Amino acid sequence: MTITVIFDMDGVLIDSEPVWREVEKAFYLQRHGLTLVDSDFDAFTGMPVMIFLRKLHERHCLPAQDLRSVHDIIVGQVAEKIRQHPEPLPGIFDLLAALKQRNIPMAVASSSPLRQIDNVLDTLNIREYFSVAISAETLKHGKPHPEIFLKAAEMMDADPESCLVIEDSLNGLIAARAAGMQVLALPAAHQRQDPRFTLADQIIDHHDEVLPFILNN
């Protein structure tokens, strides 16, 4: 069986989750005097940013009519910070090269907007490795719904059971499991002890653990 590897992006290809939080914290402090803490974000990691913004505005009774403008400002600021100071995950370039050398098909399936996916692939100069790049923003359902992974498999002409997903978030892990795929979990340091990550086939610390998993399974 030919395996297809599907990568999440934020927290898997690039260490961008801290950038999202930094930008969103600064934006809401400056515009609304609202102090956000890390726990405000954890439940929404892996989900489309618009879902987080909508829930945030509801919880704090903030105006909702300008959500699209807020979304675009935040996405633009995150994109600029990533272009200025990209932080690829350790080992990602070696992993991508090793998978390509073995002719293993690869895709990106991210909750970030497509323009942000394009920004990261171009900034890191890794677009050549991926046959498909798909954003949950173009779909009806975001993670933890499995739609994005099922759509990625369909676009890659791959059976879900032959797909291996690499995810850093619980929402992405749940989505991949619901799609009937194998999953490697690469959680952030502050989430590593969360027992829910044991839902993954394996919890990894580094990208150099991916290829051995593929070769041994």
Image (tube, rainbow, N blue to C red):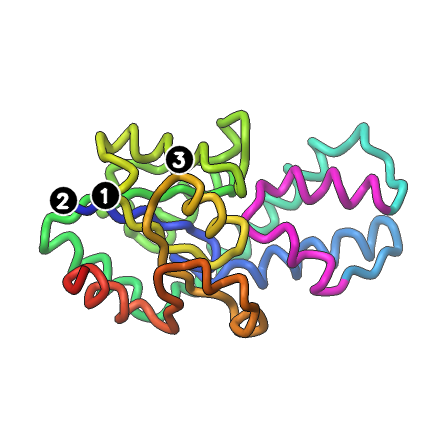
The residue mark sitting in front, 3 or 1, is 1
| Residue 134, numbered label | 3
Q: CA distance from mark 2 to mark 1?
A: 7 Å
Q: Does residue 143 lie above or below 97 as drawn?
A: above
| Residue 162, numbered label | 1
In this rendering, the count of numbered labels is 3
Q: Earlier in the sequence, mark 2 or mark 1?
A: 2
What quarter of the picture does the N terminus occupy?
Answer: top left
In the rendered image, residue 52, in percent from the top left (x then y), is placed at: 68, 44
Q: Is residue 1 magenta?
A: no
Q: Are marks 2 and 1 in contact (CB under 8 Å)?
A: yes
Q: Is residue 46 magenta?
A: yes
Q: Does residue 135 lie above or below 129 as drawn?
A: above
Q: In the rendered structure, which amino acid carries the disc numbered 1?
A: Ser
Which residue is at the front of the view, 23 or 181? 181
Q: Earlier in the sequence, mark 3 or mark 1?
A: 3
Residue 108 position by quadrant? top left
Q: Secondary structure at mark 1?
A: helix
| Residue 2, numbered label | 2
Q: Does residue 192 lie above or below 69 as drawn?
A: below
In the displayed structure image, the side of residue 83 where residue 210 appears, left or right: left
Q: CA distance from mark 3 to mark 1?
A: 18 Å
Q: In the rendered structure, which amino acid carries the disc numbered 2?
A: Thr
What span is colored magenta in the figure?
37-59
Q: CA distance from mark 3 to mark 2?
A: 21 Å
In the rendered image, residue 78, in percent from the top left (x then y), is placed at: 57, 51
| Residue 53, numbered label | none
